[in-house]
Amino acid sequence: METYQIYILTSAVLFVIGMGGVFMARHFIKKIIATIIMGGGVFLCFVSFAQRDALTFADPVPHALVITGIVVAVASAAFALALARRIYQLTGEESFTNDK
Amino acid sequence: MTDLPTSPFPALLVGLPILVATLSLFFRPRGKAVVGLMGCLLTGGLGLIALVEVMQQGTVIHILGGWDPPLGILLRMDSLAAVFIGMTAVVGVFISLYAWWFFRAREATNGGFPLFWPLWLFLWAGLNGLFLSNDLFNLFVTIEVIGMSAVALAVLSGKTAAQIAGLRYLLAAITGSMAYLFGVALIYGSTGTLDLGLLRQVLEPGATTTFALLVITLGLMIKMAGFPFHFWLPPAHSSALAPVSALLSALVVKGAFYILLRLWMEVFGVSITFSAGQLIGLAGAIAVIWGSWQAFMQTSLKLIVAHSSVAQLGYLLMIFPLLILAPGVAAGSADWLSPAWTAGVYQVMAHAFAKASFFLSAGIIIMALGHDHKGSLRDLASRMPMTVMAIGIAGVSLIGLPPSGGFFAKWMLLKGIFLSGQWWWAPVVLAGSFLTAGYVFMLLRLAFATAREKEPFRPVPKGLEVCALLLALGSFLIVLPAEYLIQFLESSEAFGSGIQSIMEGGTYGND
């Protein structure tokens, strides 16, 4: 098994953990962290493809895409945290009361 | 690809709203609204001009900054994109005008929400960008722009219910886009390209492609609130401000549908099976029945309308099984493809007009009465005839009674269903219409009933009622150019095409 395949398998595991966390966790912050883990998995998968072709240099395209993706993920996580804090200030609740 | 005529419109359609939105941030609240409205009218005008341009020239492209595609970004406007952009322009302009009067009327009490304007312009830029995008990653960026500004708009009212619904919406949106991005990563890893046109040629069937298609579809289903991921939609759409609800319901969810349609039909043809289409159709069918039934059971007007969106989006998913040909059926002999495509496009347009009008009318009623419990609709017909008329007309289009746009869409859907022999979808379409008729007529019956007690009633600016009524009429007027429009759409490569599904057994793990 080549190195990049190990990374890709890891990324799939991270993605599944994150996906499960978003749906199963109850606390807002846990849900938000789960989305970040999901993002981590996706970015790892992207970056690990960069060395796949055994070139002497890494493929720059995945790195460019991952940078964009990380910016988006940070922004949405910040937005979600701000909303969660606002909800906590308004109601004192830390999770969705009637899930689904 | 690059030999198509170049036009500046695709770049302007994305660039102008972003520019105006950023500019408007430097103005005082009152100035934001003025600049924002001007920007909306300009963007809307530009969208319509671009539609005319594509009608005359055919597909146009724009290469951003002069960098050729493998490195740079290419925006491509074919007739399908042009029709979606034109629809966004018309609906967007009416909602903007409504928002202008709506926020002016409420300025004294809560400041008039000046941030609505830049956010709506960012959203508009995202939508235009999405319709024009020609590569997978660009699509990701545009759905993120749309998702973030849509959530920000949804929580704009500052009410607790809206914040909670907004967080739920945001979490669903992030999950959806991460799933989509995961699929994109796998596709890039296996092919080394993200360009849609190129992918169609190089994509090979196999486990990776199938899995990528699966996560991309999953992500987009979450984004477009397809069953069973519809849970975030009713609270988010019903707790937002009236113009925002209209935007979210009429335009935002259509973005994810557009990507799904494009990717299934243009890119992933090699790994789609007949049963995949049946599965997505089933999700749509359940959404139609479940959403309509839930709408029927709600007690507040905005929740009724929001649940009805779940159902109407279900109809969109139901065109997918028709577009996928069973093994052994030649695309040339499949005469139901064109009706099914027509049904999809018309359902998008009819729902955009009718649902925008419905939500705007609900906003008018809330403004007049202070709440939207359905019991308070009593005697509305004598006090606000124009709004009741708008609800009635929009409702007729949602039910699908002739000669509305909704009727045309559902009739074409039924035609496609019977021509293709997949008769099992037909009862769902009919049952959905009956349930929709149930809640629309219930609302109208209340509106014409006499009131038990007179509720306090505030006058509403006439402009609001006119906007809602014109949008409702729009859902009828779109039928008039139907023949011309379909002819125009047929110039798009995707329109009218079907997927030759691969043979059973060769689906998974053949690499």
Image: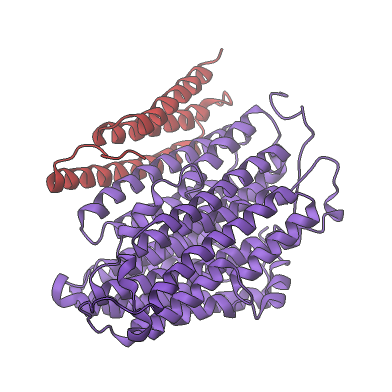
Q: Which chain is red?
A: A
Task: Please identify the quarter of the rendering in which residue A93 is found.
Answer: top left
**Residue located at (66% from left, 50% from top):** B320
Q: Which chain is purple?
A: B
Front residue of B208 and A68: B208
Does residue A41 lie above or below B247 as drawn? Answer: above
- Considering every residue shown, the one lying at the far front of the view is B452
Residue B201 in the figure: left or right of residue B368: right
Q: Quarter holding the N terminus of chain B?
A: bottom right
Q: Is any atom of residue B67 visible in this view?
A: no
Could you tell me residue B415's position as x and y percent? 75, 61
Residue B414 in the figure: left or right of residue A15: right
- Considering every residue shown, the one lying at the far top of the view is A1
Task: Please identify the quarter of the rendering in which residue B249 is found.
Answer: bottom left
Front residue of B366 and B445: B445
Could you tell me residue B284's position as x and y percent? 58, 49
**Residue located at (47% from left, 37% from top):** B179
